[in-house]
Each structure stands twice: as C-alpha cells, then as structure tokens.
Amino acid sequence: MSRFVRSRTLYSTRTGPPNSEATHLSTTSCGVPRDCLPAADPHVVTSLFFRPNLNSFGHLDASLAGGIHTPSLFAHRAESCHVLFNQGSNRQASTPRGPPPTVGPMLHTRLGRTDLTVSRVALGCMSYGDPGVGLHTWTLDEDASQPFFRQAIELGVTFWDTANVYQQGTSEEYVGRAVRRYSRRDDVVLATKVFGRMHDGPTGAGLSRAAIHEQCDASLRRLGTDWIDLYFIHRFDDTVPVEETMEALHDLVVDGKVRHVGASSMWAWQFAKMQTAAAVNGWTPFTAMQDQYNLLKREEEREMLPMCADMGVGVVPYSPQGKGRLTRPWGQQTARASVDEVAKSFDSPADQPIVEAVEAVAAERGVSMAQVALAWVLSKPVVAAPLVGATKPHHLADAVAALDLVLTDDETSRLECPYVPQEPYWW
Ligand SMILES: NC(=O)c1ccc[n+]([C@@H]2O[C@H](COP(=O)([O-])OP(=O)(O)OC[C@H]3O[C@@H](n4cnc5c(N)ncnc54)[C@H](OP(=O)(O)O)[C@@H]3O)[C@@H](O)[C@H]2O)c1
C-alpha cells in the first residue's frame, strides 16, 4: 500500500506534567532538532485571555522560552527540549481588567512571525454555508450557523477561517455578518482563501494576477470588510509562474486589502519555490501554512513542518480531528460522515487502531475522543492553532477543553505507534 518504509513513531514527543492555574498552559515539550528552530524566537508569544464579556478583557503574555518542536522523521537529529510558557522572568503579567472570567480562559499565540495574535483554537467555517450550493450538502444554513459564531466569540475563539469556495461564497457572507453581529471587526482574525473555481473563465479560479485581484475583491465584498487578516492560496497553481502569484499577493498587501499571506497543502518544494520568489524580489513572503495534520495524517512531519519551523511560518492545521473520524468509535456514522465524499475518500482500514487508541485514552481520562485528538495536535509546538469544525453544540466547548488536556508520554506513544506512513493527501 505504501511506498514508504514503515515507521512506528514519526514524532518524538515528551509532555510535561499538568500544572496548576495558568501554568496548565505552561509546559509543553517535544523532541526538537534545535538547529531547525529560531532560537528563543521573540515573535512566538502565548497569551491567556480572560473574557468576562465581549467588551473587556485582559491578558497575560509570555515569550517562548526555548526552541520549538519537531519533526520526528528527523528523530536521529533531534534532542529533547521543553518549551516553557508563562514561567520565570518571561512572564509579563498585566492586571486583568473587569470582573473574573465567566468563560475561558482561552490561550492565544502569535502566529509565526506575523503581528497577528490568534486564539489557539480556530473556528473552521467550512461547516457554515448554504447546503444547496457548493461542494457539501451537510453544511449548516445561516440560522443553524449563528449559535456557533456566537459561542465562538463567547469562548474566545476569535480566529476564523473560511474560503471563497466554501459553499460558493455563502460561508464568507455568513462569517461577515456574524462578525458584525457578535463581535467587532478588530477583535476577530479573519482568514479566507483563493484558488478554487468560483465561475467560468480565466479569472474564476487559479492564481493568476487577474484571478487573485478579482477574487480578493469579491471576498472583501462578501465578508463586508476592508481587509483580510490572512489570505491563503488554497493550493499550488502549476499553470502560473510563481513570480506572478507572489507579486499579485504582495500588491494586495501594499494596497492594504490583505495583512498577511499564507499557503495551503502543497509539496514542500513548491512552497520553498514561492518563498524564494518573494525573497529574491522583495515581495511579501508567506507567514502561515494551512495543511492537514492529525493523528491519521502525519506525512507533513517529513518536510513541510520542519521547513515551517525553520522559516518561522505559523502552522494552522485543518481537519485536526480527522474530519470527525477521530471523535467517535470506529464505524460510527454521523450525518456529515454519511454524505461527505471528501471525508469518505480518506477512510482507510489502517486508521482503525489509531481510532481505537484515541477511544481507549479518552475512556481512561474520562474525556471525549475529540479532546484527545485535538490535545495531541495542540501538543506539537509547531502548531499555532488547529482549525476545528463544529456542527453540534458541544463541539466548540470540547475543543477549548482540549487546551487543558496534557497527554503523558505513554499516552502520546500509544496514540502515535499504530501510524502507518502513507501517500500524501491534500484536502
Ligand atoms: N485548506 C484546506 O484545503 C482545508 C480543507 C479542509 C478543511 N479546512 C478548514 O479546516 C476546518 C476544519 O475542517 P474539518 O471540519 O475537517 O475539521 P475537524 O475538526 O477534523 O472535523 C470536524 C468534525 O469532527 C466532528 N467533531 C468535532 N468536534 C467534535 C466533538 N467534540 N465530538 C464529536 N464530534 C466532533 C464533527 O463531525 P460530524 O459533523 O460528523 O459530527 C465535525 O464536523 C474547515 O472548516 C476549514 O476552515 C481547510
């Protein structure tokens, strides 16, 4: 089945003990090739946000004390290190304003080397959009979506990801209205994407200069905003010179329409080629990578994740819960699972022992499988913020609760060991 050599543990991880108070956030760890990492990167910051209500909050910031994570396929080069948040002299506390928190706390982090502070759990908005148009029939219409946007704001989940193609632009429309209804534009970090087909003709898809400019303007209109915080290319376009794409993206930044640019799911060499084009020409480089990463899909540990760590690119993985397959016992179905052809295309018998390991750890800990699956992704320091999908009321609360779950070495090893290397997968 696979042309890769079987490897039992791709990621070498050590996990610190649970701590009290804010410091339950504080210790995470990993085996890391230190030479792969920016030393004591001052751009990587964690914040503990208190959200007593939608209008007032204070936060604690702390610089990352040590190196980062690590791509395990390079375990022969790796040495273990602990990454300490909110400890010792790195802890810069500010007095929280307002009454004590009624929800939260939500951990925040600086995204790569950007000036964006994002919640460590992001709301994936592919679940919200008109089910009558677009790729998926399981998405929630606007009325059904509203509680999730509202709950996200209440929980401090202020990083939202959508795309022009999600249900033919209706996801962006819902997101734009929800930001105005439940929050303020400045308080939400908005990400959207360009590449997929929106209409016939050369500017309806792809990464040509004309397509990027037209599609960005259309996204801004649907979102009802003057700027996009993070603009992703949804895939690599091998029909367009990378210089044309990178210059067009740079021009959007210069025009103030986009603050930062990112890329999603491509070969590492393609990403490197685009970054090089930007560097050589003085254009804006990518500062974020959105690729699939979860216990069932770990091929990005080979090249992409180490490269992102090296470049200081923030990683915001999609489908961190395996499109739902890691959140329920093997074989159990849901409405989405029964009709989502994309998710079904990932089904593999090789996943069963991993799903069973998640179920066993969850049962022992007395938490949901979703929390275990997400805690594993969150434990990898290369990950800034996983993009979670939520279709039922408890999903987002579970996702936020995963921030409190610190897996032991033994648990991590049991979750990772059944993995069988496989072909890359990209959607
Ligand atoms: N760049 C790209 O190419 C790309 C591709 C895919 C996704 N994305 C982004 O990533 C986001 C998330 O993707 P995803 O929906 O595949 O992520 P996911 O978090 O892996 O899966 C979400 C699904 O997991 C299940 N789930 C979540 N929390 C649960 C809980 N607490 N208990 C039980 N089940 C739970 C639900 O399944 P059921 O609905 O079946 O109950 C939910 O629909 C998208 O919204 C989008 O923003 C990007």
Image (tube, rainbow, N blue to C red):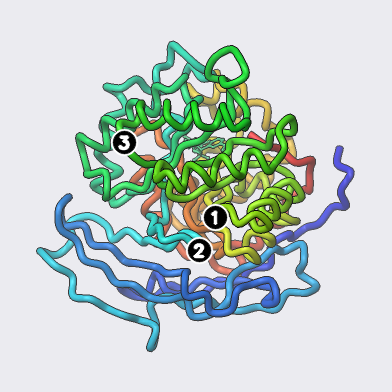
The quadrant of the picture occupied by the N terminus is: top right
Q: Which amino acid does label 1 sit on?
A: Thr
Q: Which residue is drawn at 68% across and 45% down?
A: 353
Name the image quarter holding residue 314: bottom right
Label 1 – label 3 distance at C-alpha: 21 Å
Give the numbered dot on residue 287: 1
Give the numbered dot on residue 113: 2
Name which of mark 1 and mark 3 comes first in the sequence: 3
Q: Residue at x 24, y 38 (%)?
A: 150
Place of residue 257 in the rendered image (x, y in percent of width and height, measured from the top left): 40, 41
Say which element carries label 1.
strand
Name the image quarter holding residue 184: top left
Whether residue 347 can be seen here: yes
Q: Which residue is drawn at 46% across and 31% down?
A: 126
Instruction: Please state if 42 lies on the left or on the right of 10 as rendered.
Output: left
Place of residue 213 in the rendered image (x, y in percent of width and height, measured from the top left): 50, 31
Q: Is residue 318 above or below residue 34?
A: above
Residue in the foreground of this view, choosing between 357 and 305: 305
